Image: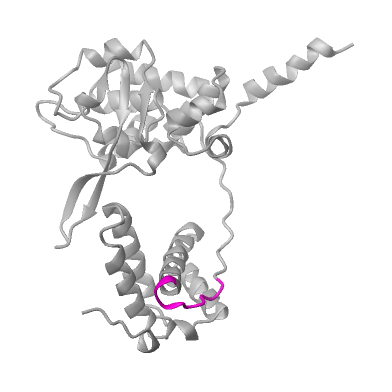
């Protein structure tokens, strides 16, 4: 039985209660991430045995610093702090608790990697020279902007009449017995449910490989499915062979968005194709103007030059 007396409850006990109450409402992959952050960091900290009312902002700052001292990245530390915030928010709802202020770590903004036109050309030439299921998946992501989990979760029934229906994502998680299993889960956000029209040139490439509706899009007689980790590793190998450095599979999504803007897509259309809830996210996070596009834009001023 879960402890219900908040007056004698430690942060560890409160966190376990929070996880229990959220077990059915959270996506399985999200629940696992939260559970790992709680059990490996929050429940093992000096805050764990404290009553929530005794935890002060200074104590949370010390907790954050100790996490950084363990060489955790600011992003990871902020994710752990977000779990702590969610536990406090739960206590506020359930017990009228007034949570302490949480100061998040300032993250240094990293320059987002986008393939140059020349790099993309090299990559496509390599992919087309041997269009196996892994290379097909990489090319598909490059021209649709889908996330790696969405790509691996696609089945042939999702690809119809020149469109792709995104309605699930693939994850590998640990089940209740600690065994590693692959699951199909809901997409990242409600706006991630979407239909993406395929570029015309992609349709014949895809249709030549069509299999049974219930089979995965990335499958063959010898390989019933491709997991995200597998195709991510495959992309690393392909990038190395093409002389492309510093790129990850997610680079394909950023590259897709940037090429779309360069080709004249309006921001609203691109936002819906990427599965974003608002245009601002698309423009701020996924659109990166190339130097060539900046030069072309600046040269438009020639028209008004005296």
Determine the image quadrant of residue 208. top left
Considering the image in quadrants, where does the C terminus appear?
top right
Q: Please name the residue shown 34% across and 24% down the image.
A: 140
Please give the name of the residue rendered at 13% of the width and 32% of the height, measured from the top-left corner: 224
Residue 131 in percent (x, y) is at 26, 19
Image: magenta residue range: 93-101
Picture coordinates of residue 38, whole percent (x, y): 35, 69
Instruction: Check the image and name the residue furthest to the bottom.
Output: 8
Q: Locate residue 246 relative to residue 153 in the image: left or right.
A: right
Q: Quadrant of the N terminus?
A: bottom left
Q: Nearer the viewer, residue 17 or 206?
A: 17
- Measured from the top left, where is residue 10 in percent x and y? 37, 84
Residue at horizontal 45 percent and vertical 22 percent from the top? 120
What secondary structure predominates along the stretch shown in magenta? Answer: loop
Please tell me whether residue 96 belongs to the stretch shown in magenta: yes
Query: In this view of the protein, which residue sits in the foreground, 29 or 127?
Result: 29
């Amino acid at each position: 039985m879960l402890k219900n007396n908040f007056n004698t409850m430690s942060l560890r006990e409160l966190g376990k209660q929070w996880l229990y109450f959220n077990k059915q409402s959270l996506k399985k992959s999200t629940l696992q991430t939260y559970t790992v952050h709680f059990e490996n960091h929050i429940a093992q900290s000096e805050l764990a045995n404290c009553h929530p009312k005794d935890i002060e902002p200074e104590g949370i700052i010390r907790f954050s610093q100790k996490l950084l001292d363990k060489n955790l990245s600011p992003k990871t530390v902020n994710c752990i702090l977000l779990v702590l915030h969610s536990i406090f928010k739960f206590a506020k709802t359930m017990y009228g608790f007034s949570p302490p202020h949480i100061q998040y770590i300032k993250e240094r903004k990293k320059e987002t990697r986008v393939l140059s036109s020349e790099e993309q050309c090299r990559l496509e030439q390599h992919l087309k020279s041997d269009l196996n299921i892994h290379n097909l998946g990489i090319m598909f992501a490059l021209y649709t902007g889908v996330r790696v989990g969405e790509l691996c979760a696609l089945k042939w029934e999702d690809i119809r009449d020149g469109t792709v229906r995104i309605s699930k994502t693939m994850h590998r998680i640990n089940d209740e017995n600690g065994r590693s299993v692959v699951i199909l889960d809901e997409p990242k956000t409600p706006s991630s449910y979407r239909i993406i029209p395929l570029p015309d040139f992609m349709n014949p490439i895809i249709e030549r490989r069509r299999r049974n509706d219930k089979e995965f899009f990335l499958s063959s007689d010898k390989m019933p499915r491709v997991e995200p980790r597998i195709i991510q590793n495959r992309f690393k190998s392909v990038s190395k062979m093409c002389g492309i450095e510093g790129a990850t599979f997610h680079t394909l999504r950023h590259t897709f968005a940037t090429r779309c803007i360069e080709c004249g897509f309006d921001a609203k259309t691109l936002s819906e194709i990427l599965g974003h809830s608002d245009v601002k996210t698309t423009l701020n996070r996924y659109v990166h103007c190339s130097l060539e596009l900046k030069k072309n834009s600046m040269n438009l001023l020639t028209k008004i030059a005296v």
